[in-house]
Image (tube, rainbow, N blue to C red):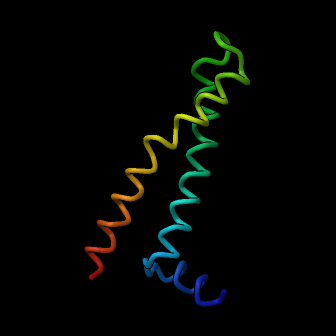
Amino acid sequence: MTDLLTSLIVGDINLITGLILLVIATLLSVVGGAIGGMMLAGKEFGYQFSAMLGGLLAPAGVIPVVILGLVILKVLTN
């Protein structure tokens, strides 16, 4: 566990830290998508429905970009 935390703090990107960063980015995108959906379409469609749609659709744009960013960081550090 300490090796994992050390790798995350130092910025060493391996398979495990990459997956952890991907999960963190996905969770943050779900929260951001839900908030954005509520702000954009809350009054028209209802706050719960728009938050659900925003939370479901936000990771579709975030996951490929995070994977691409991690691959670029790995290539640049080596």
Which quarter of the picture shows residue 68?
bottom left
Image check: 41 left or right of 12?
A: right
User: How many numbered tags mark residues here?
Assistant: 0
In this rendering, is residue 67 above or below 49? below
Locate the N terminus and report the quarter of the image it occupies: bottom right
In this rendering, is residue 9 above or below 3? above
Which quarter of the picture shows residue 25?
bottom right
In this rendering, is residue 55 above or below 2? above
Report x, y in % for residue 20.
56, 68
**Residue at 51 percent of width and 60 percent of height:** 22
Locate the C terminus and report the quarter of the image it occupies: bottom left
**Residue at 71 percent of width and 16 percent of height:** 46
Q: Nearer the viewer, residue 28 or 1?
A: 1
Report x, y in % for residue 75.
26, 74
In this rendering, is residue 28 above or below 44? below
Report x, y in % for residue 62.
45, 46
Q: Kindly give the residue lying farthest to the top in the view shown.
A: 44
**Residue at 46 percent of width and 78 percent of height:** 11
Which quarter of the picture shows residue 35?
top right
Q: Kindly give the residue lying farthest to the bottom in the view shown.
A: 3
Report x, y in % for residue 77.
30, 79
